[in-house]
């Protein structure tokens, strides 16, 4: 019981410190926040050797636990990936600071001048698995948008995350900002997650989970504060009849196989029945030759003996692996209906040279991200010009799609008068 009390005291202290830091950071000038981000990028580069060594410890532990190739890839850091993280921080520096932006301004009949102004959300709790880069991405986005952040990485990345957090602590101190703007829960005790979900005595304003279904499901079920998240990434590519076969093949191959373990990886391929004779075989063969297992309906099985039958469940499945479900559809209406039934509202793409049908697809598919002639692997805040993302949300309130700087702000109204009082 004493250990629980000790952890509770520790977590409440993090929340209290974050709340104080958030109030200070909300008023910090852009120059100071940008200086801290540049400091953090410099610290990551300077400490790269130690971070990679710590990451090797995390990898060895994960390998011993047989977590699988996809998770090992998410955990792994090397010099190139660390440099990518540092460059992402520098990209965020170049973005406009959303805090204080006047979204609208108008005057009403009473003579009052009213402004709607962007403000930070406050304290963001980020709970994540397997991806040590989230430590830096989340810290940077929260810092630039004026929010304090409490980071809780899974035990499998604890060594890596601790050192990355240390880079931010030194960076904040050098920029004369409160070090508690970025804090980390440095314990593997899962009870800490429950305490964050309860809101840490009303100090946490939003929770962002990054991880598998188990984590995200728990957060969505238990959180007593708002959540930005998606549970599944069942992403589709629809090869429409008017598509160019070479483009279709390359988009499908990239959407599935570039990185199979990310939430933007395509899990289902839909092929228009009107182009089956020209498109299905080369696309399926390209997937198979790239090492992807293909599970398909009868027309798909007929083009290659290596295709195995797809079950109903396959079309609901987020594989996060080199596996894809394939189905032929009679046209746009059936493709849209299939996505509505089996999809998760994450990312869908149509490959077509018919601009009218592409526009129809973009208008009718109700997902957070809908694409035309592009790989679903572009479903990423960095690729959207946001510098980075704290996650992708599929909900319909406040944030949808990549959660970047703008999505980490709310707004308030400023009302200026000249002594007006409201008539009785």
Image: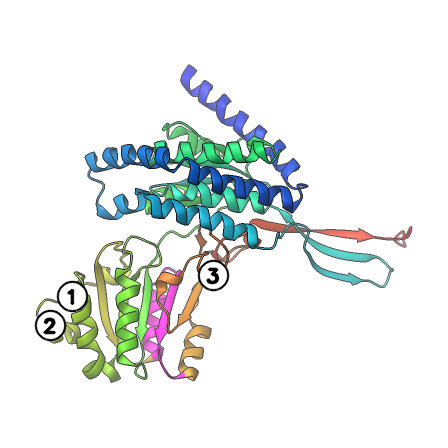
User: In this picture, is 50 found above or below 10?
Assistant: below
Q: Nearer the viewer, mark 2 or mark 3?
A: 3
At a point 45% along the width and 54% down the height, the residue shown is 393
Q: Residues within 10 Å of mark 2 (few under 14, many from 20)?
A: some
Is 274 positioned to the left or the right of 380 in the image? left
Q: Nearer the viewer, residue 261 or 193?
A: 261
Residue for badge 3: 384
Q: CA distance from mark 1 to mark 3?
A: 30 Å
Residue for badge 1: 288
Query: Residue 210: where, in percent of width, then height?
Result: 40, 45
Ranked by sequence position, the earlier of labels 2 and 1 is 1
Query: Residue 115: where, in percent of width, then height?
Result: 75, 56
- Location of residue 133 by image quarter: top left
At a point 44% along the width and 67% down the height, the residue shown is 366
Ranked by sequence position, the earlier of labels 2 and 3 is 2
Please say whether residue 339 is one of the residues in the magenta stretch: yes
Q: Residues within 10 Å of mark 3 (few under 14, many from 20)?
A: few
At a point 17% along the width and 73% down the height, the residue shown is 300
User: In this picture, is 27 found above or below 327?
Assistant: above
At a point 76% along the width and 51% down the height, the residue shown is 414
Query: Residue 104: where, in percent of width, then height?
Result: 71, 61
The answer to whether marks 2 and 1 mark residues whose Cβ atoms lie closer than 8 Å is yes
Q: Quadrant of the N terminus?
A: top left
Question: Which span of residues is magenta-colored?
Answer: 332-354
Please tell me whether mark 1 sits on a helix, a strand or a loop: helix
Q: Nearer the viewer, residue 380 or 176?
A: 176
Residue for badge 2: 304
């Amino acid at each position: 019981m004493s250990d629980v009390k000790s952890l509770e005291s520790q977590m409440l202290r993090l929340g209290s410190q974050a709340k104080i830091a958030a109030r200070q950071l909300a008023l910090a000038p852009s120059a100071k926040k940008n200086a801290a981000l540049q400091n953090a990028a410099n610290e990551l580069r300077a400490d790269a050797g130690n971070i990679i060594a710590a990451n090797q410890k995390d990898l060895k532990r994960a390998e011993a636990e047989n977590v699988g190739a996809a998770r090992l890839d998410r955990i792994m850091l090397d010099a190139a990936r660390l440099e990518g993280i540092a460059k992402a921080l520098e990209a965020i520096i170049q973005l406009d600071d959303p805090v204080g932006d006047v979204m609208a301004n108008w005057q009403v009949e009473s003579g009052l001048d009213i402004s709607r102004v962007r403000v930070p959300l406050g304290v963001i709790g980020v709970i994540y698995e397997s991806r040590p880069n989230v430590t830096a991405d989340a810290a940077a986005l929260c810092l630039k948008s004026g929010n304090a952040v409490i980071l809780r990485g899974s035990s499998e990345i604890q060594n890596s995350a601790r050192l990355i957090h240390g880079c931010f602590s030194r960076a904040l101190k050098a920029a004369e900002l409160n070090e508690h703007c970025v804090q980390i829960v440095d314990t593997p005790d899962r009870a800490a997650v429950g305490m964050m979900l309860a809101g840490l005595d009303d100090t946490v304003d939003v929770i962002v989970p990054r991880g598998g279904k188990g984590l995200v499901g728990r957060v969505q079920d238990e959180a007593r504060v708002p959540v930005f998240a998606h549970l599944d990434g069942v992403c589709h590519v629809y090869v429409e009849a008017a598509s160019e076969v070479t483009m279709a093949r390359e988009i499908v191959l990239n959407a599935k196989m570039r990185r199979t373990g990310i939430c933007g990886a395509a899990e289902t391929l839909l092929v228009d029945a009107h182009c089956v004779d020209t498109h299905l075989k080369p696309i399926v063969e390209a997937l198979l030759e790239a090492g992807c297992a293909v599970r398909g309906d009868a027309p798909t099985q007929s083009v290659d003996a290596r295709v195995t039958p797809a079950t109903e469940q396959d079309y609901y499945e987020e594989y996060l692996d080199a596996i894809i479900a394939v189905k032929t559809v009679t046209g746009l209406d059936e493709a849209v209906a299939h996505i509505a039934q089996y999809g998760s509202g994450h990312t869908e793409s149509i490959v077509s040279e018919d601009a009218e049908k592409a526009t129809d697809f973009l208008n009718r598919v109700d997902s957070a991200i809908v694409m035309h002639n592009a790989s679903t692997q572009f479903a990423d805040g960095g690729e959207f010009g946001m510098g980075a993302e704290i996650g992708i949300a599929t909900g319909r309130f406040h944030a949808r799609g990549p959660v970047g700087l703008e999505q980490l702000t709310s707004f308030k109204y400023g009302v200026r008068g000249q002594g007006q009082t409201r008539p009785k």
